[in-house]
Image: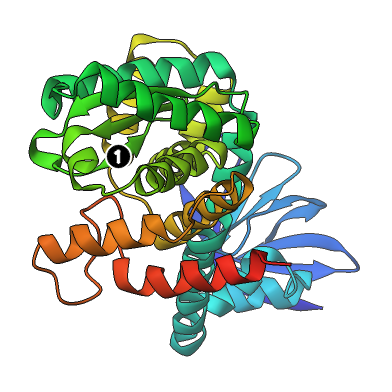
Amino acid sequence: MGNIEGRYFVAGSSASQDARFELVDGLAMIRLADGSQTYSGEVALVSDRLGNVVRKITLYDGSLFETPDNNGVDELFDVHKSFFNRLTHIESSVKLVAILAVVTMLVLFGAYRYGLPILARVAANVTPTSVLSLMDAGARETVDRVIFSKTKLDDKKRAVISVLFEDLKKQSGQIDPPLRLLFRDGGILGANAIALPGGTVIITDQLVGKAKSDDEIAGVLGHEIGHVELRHSLRQIYRVLGISFMVTIIGGDSSQLVEDVIAQASALENLSYSRKFETESDYRSAELMVGLGRDPYAFVELLKRITLDKGEKSDTGWLATHPGTFDRMATVKKYVNSLKP
């Protein structure tokens, strides 16, 4: 048997009286301050503990007993192991709250750092071709309007490069999305090449002008084909825009808002890849070049020349789209050596 002090409210009344609550053989007994008993029966409901909020004990006749004695209620009804009691205990411990805060931040970081990329890769692999085509069209329209202009390469040069591209396309076996080559004046991007999410590869006049051999150009094209095959552009977009956007796109939402977002995002995200994505595409370029019997190192030499022409003396990158030029040289050479029988 035990008792707790508090206030008693008769059913249907807002007036309260000082009273004592007792629990005898599982039955509740309410005694007023003058010692008289006003209720004897079962308890209908006991509110959960939440910080220092007053506890409420609802009785079967509709009357109510309130008390600030949280510990007394816990002892009386033996609810020490309930979720809210455990939560209150945690909240009262500054050290424990600090530890949980750190753990929460680590979990969130891990989800963003590792979980989101995994989800992005899975989502990219199951994204419908129709969505990829929409992204590709939007991206082409954006970069043509903002960055590129009409190519100035002569028909003969474009024909030679187109043959190289067709050879690489056949060697890659890429079907969905289908590969397509476009020529553009690079404008502010200068010597560059980009791969759009729907399979379009764009190479600039300036990059062609810096190449000293067909193999150098082929290596660049192989690199961009690698981006398409591995769906790097789409994975970048999903990583930036998050899980809800993945679900919306894969679910087939074709609203104008979605169309606008994917068009703009695809255009912008294609201008920046992670080092991991760049390395994967470097490897794919090397594989395609070796498969065609072409020089896989030519691509590396072109990167070096572009980097030096820009006046870079350290590992600062091949434009914004291709970071880490100098360490990539060693990485590509090492990978090419591993391909040799």
Q: Quadrant of the C terminus?
A: bottom right
At horizontal 15% and vertical 41% (from top left) the residue drawn is: 189
Which image quadrant is residue 247 in? top right
- Kindly state the secondary structure of the residue where label 1 is placed: strand
Q: Along the line of sight, which residue is nearer the eye, 147 or 268? A: 147
**In the image: residue 31, left or right of residue 53:** right
Where does residue 221 sit, x and y in percent of width and height? 41, 39
Where does residue 320 sit, x and y in percent of width and height? 22, 53
Where does residue 331 sit, x and y in percent of width and height? 47, 72
Q: Along the line of sight, which residue is nearer the eye, 228 or 46? A: 228
At horizontal 61% and vertical 36% (from top left) the residue drawn is: 172
Q: In this rendering, is residue 295 above or below 132?
A: below
Q: Give the residue at the far right of this rendering.
A: 25
Kind of residue at badge 1: Ala
Which image quadrant is residue 301 in? bottom left
Which image quadrant is residue 28 in? bottom right
**In the image: residue 103, left or right of residue 145:** right
